[in-house]
Amino acid sequence: MEFPSNKKSIHEALAESQNKLIEHLQSSEKRYSNLVENLRDTVFQLDTEFRWSFVNRAGSIMTWFEAGQVLNREFIEHVAVQDTERCLYHFRSLISGKTREVSDRITYQRADGVERVFELACRAMKDEAESYNGIAGTLTDITERLKTENKVIHMAYHDSLTGLANRRLLHDYLKKNSRSNI
């Protein structure tokens, strides 16, 4: 009986299989890392105290803070005053399980002092024991889009030569006020 050679081939087969799994895992991790790091939107994670625990490269570009400058610092530290309480309310609702996901606009002050408007989308994360252990989400800079939308609205309601309000603005104003007086 030649059991030792069979045992060796079984061990070799297991080792080869294990090596293939490790290579596959490493390849998968590299693809995921490349994907997250090359997105235009900020991908982030917060701990249960709402401190940054992860931010991709886009987060540094959008906020003008290096990743090392924000990690372990409070997310709301640079959120505009008018948005701070609402943002904290959303985060607390996520961590407590009252809310499954949040989508909101927030104003964020970059490192250079410039304020930008971001679309915030996030969800609570759970650990293996199904306990909430943080928040994962994205930030999309919508500042330029809002400026363009406001410009289009202004153009719709104002004369292009004089900049004065046009008939459409007057009509909409009268329509709105006639409803509120009823």
Image (spheres, rainbow, N blue to C red):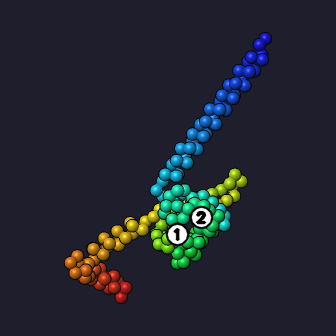
The residue that appears at 74% across and 21% down in the rendered structure is 8
- State which tag comes first along the sequence, 2 or 1: 2
Where residue 29 appears, as percent x and y from the top left, is: 58, 44
The residue that appears at 78% across and 11% down in the rendered structure is 1
The residue that appears at 51% across and 65% down in the rendered structure is 63
Could you tell me the amino acid type at mark 1? Ala
User: Which residue of the protein is positioned furthest toward the left in this rendering?
Assistant: 161
Where residue 86 appears, as percent x and y from the top left, is: 56, 73
The quarter of the picture where the C terminus appears is bottom left
Q: Is residue 8 left or right of residue 152?
A: right
Crowding near the residue tagged with mark 2, few <14, some 14–19, many ≥20 C-alpha atoms within 10 Å: few
Q: Are marks 2 and 1 in contact (CB under 8 Å)?
A: yes
Secondary structure category for the residue under label 1: loop
Number of marks present in the image shown: 2
Query: Residue 159's image quarter?
Result: bottom left
The residue that appears at 52% across and 47% down in the rendered structure is 34
Could you tell me the amino acid type at mark 2? Gln
Vertical order, 66 against 160 (above or below): above
User: Which residue of the protein is positioned furthest toward the top in this rendering?
Assistant: 1
Task: Determine which residue is flagged by label 2.
Answer: 69
Foreground: 77 or 123? 77
Secondary structure category for the residue under label 2: helix
**Label 2 to label 1, Cα distance in Å?**
10 Å
Q: Which mark is residue 111?
A: 1
Where residue 112 appears, as percent x and y from the top left, is: 49, 71
Q: Is residue 47 left or right of residue 156?
A: right
Q: Is residue 27 left or right of residue 163?
A: right
Q: Is residue 79 visible?
A: yes
Foreground: 153 or 96? 153
Vertical order, 68 against 37 (above or below): below
Q: Which mark is residue 33?
A: none
